[in-house]
Amino acid sequence: MSWSDLNSTLPELALAVTALILLILEVVKEPPRAQFAWTALGGIALALVLEFALPIEGQFYNGMIALDHFSRFLNVIFMITAAGAVLIAVPYLRKSLEERGEYYALLLFATIGMMFMAKAHDLTILFLGLELLSIPLYILVGFYRHRVRSNEASLKYLLLGAFSTGFFLFGIALLYGSTGATHYDAIRQAIVSDGQLSPAMTLAGFGLLLVGFAFKVALVPFHMYAPDVYEGAPTAITAFLSTGPKVAGFAAFLKVIITSFAVTTQHWWGIVWVLAALTMTVGNVTAIRQDNLKRMLAFSSVAHAGYLAVAVLVGTYDSAFGMMFYLAVYAVTTLGAFGVVALIEGEEETSLEIDGYRGLARRSPFLAAIFTLAMVSLAGFPPTAGFLGKYFVFSAAVDTGNTWNIWLVVIAILNSLISVYYYLRPVVAMYMQEPADETPLPMSRVAVPVFLVLVLIVLGFGIFPMMLVKSGVAAAGSLF
Amino acid sequence: MVVPLYHILAFAGLLFTIGVVGVLFRRNAIIVFMSVEIMLNAVNLAFVAFSRYHGNVNGQVFVFFIMTLAAAEVAVGLAIIVSLFRNLRTSDISEIRLMKH
């Protein structure tokens, strides 16, 4: 190990040190504890600066970690997501008097895990990143340990998460057994030059890896835990849970498929096709029936996983770029939407039902406007960035000229039409119905930056997308 | 006498299946959790077998990581089960159904 190796992980080290400082502060400091959030934000800002100070190209730690435009693009998304989750958590935790240092420390550890998943160029690092992401999240989902729902969500997430890790690992074991390597490039080499023990074992290993990924990003039929976990978790955590891990999971999935398994596409594309079609259809159709906003957004995030799976399936340069754009927009939009839900939520998890949103435009015009913007972008109306994301992904699929891909896009567009219904339901409730009580909603100023970033990205990049397109193209380019 | 690779693999596969069946059919959260551990140990066994077969050490290093992960997961998992038990007085996962499906 050399200094350049250490340098390549400086942002993660900065976050780890911040997390440890937070754990110490938690023991030492007496309330009030507002400093925790600021410490965490300071750590994230430092990591962001270090990320840009790093060399942009190169492999480190014997090729296990790869720095490129891809990892930088995603790491910036992760750090923005983490900062947003911290800002949402401040007013949210204050409501329940649970503001504690370990909350932010665990959030930072999970962020480090996501960053390693994007930087990984070896299945060992991918696995470590995935677990570093998952284990803090098990705890965070159950953070309200006196609330039974939070407990239940945490237990479900833990058992299914550990179960899926088992498949994921067995897949890696079979791949290692068949190819003798865990390095992405070495696996591809073994497949291309036919240096495998048995091609069937490689495929079985890839299949199990696929199951592990499908669990993590909640593809149907492996999504069963998602609605319950998203509903039971503290809303500020649901915001993080439905963005960060999903982005990290898809990014790692895409990178593994493109760098190692592109040559075996003909063996597995049918399975991913069915998973994508099922995921978007089940996600959207079930979301229609939900009255609880948290559950509705949970199914909506399942549906979006379906759209993203289209990009993974197509696997071309264009679709990888579309996915980068989509992931950036999706992360910010969903984080903001859950942020609004977290702020509107009363103590003891009240007003999560759609009835609680009646007449919100009069009680809090700002939150209502932000929520509307988020819904419109998730539904994919122009001129929002959500529309462009869908456009880039679907047009990349159509451009391949493959009939099956085109049919998948047809299904995806029909699904987008269905989704308009449930995305607009809360909007109708907020603007066209009378509130049960007219008292203005108290609004914390801390979370405002999250919503401003949302407006900036959804409208700014919706109308002037060039900047995000350029970074997305660079990110996709370093995969090929 | 050297045990052939495929014998060890068959054994690892069997252990893994036992773990999967345990997760799917047992109702006690702690037993489900133990079944997950069996799955992880099946993976460890496969890794060690492959490592010896290929004559490189990657697989054995991976096993160390998996053992560390399993320990961390048990620590977190048991804490979660205990806090649930304190609230509900049960660790039977078929009784833990507050949210609608």
Image (cartoon, coloured by chain):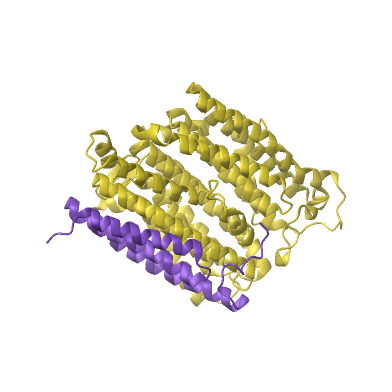
**In terms of image quadrants, where is residue A149?**
bottom right
Task: Determine the colour of chain A.
Answer: yellow
Point out the image quarter for the N terminus of chain B.
bottom left
Image x and y of residue A277, in percent: 56, 37
Q: Residue at x 76, y 44 (%)?
A: A425
Residue closer to the observer: A128 or A174:
A174
Q: How many marks?
A: 0
Q: Residue furthest left?
A: B1
Image x and y of residue A422, in percent: 72, 43
Q: Is residue A202 left or right of residue A279?
A: left
Kindly tell me whether residue A196 is visible in this rendering: yes
Up-down relation of residue A11 to residue A190 (above or below): below
Residue closer to the observer: A319 or A288:
A288
Kindly tell me whether residue A9 is visible in this rendering: no
Q: Residue at x 49, y 77 (%)?
A: A28
Q: Is residue A374 left or right of residue A77?
A: right
Q: Residue at x 74, y 62 (%)?
A: A350
Point out the image quarter for the C terminus of chain B.
bottom right
Q: Residue at x 54, y 25 (%)?
A: A406
Task: Determine the colour of chain B.
Answer: purple
Image x and y of residue A15, in percent: 43, 58
Image x and y of residue A432, in percent: 85, 43
Residue closer to the observer: A359 or A150:
A150
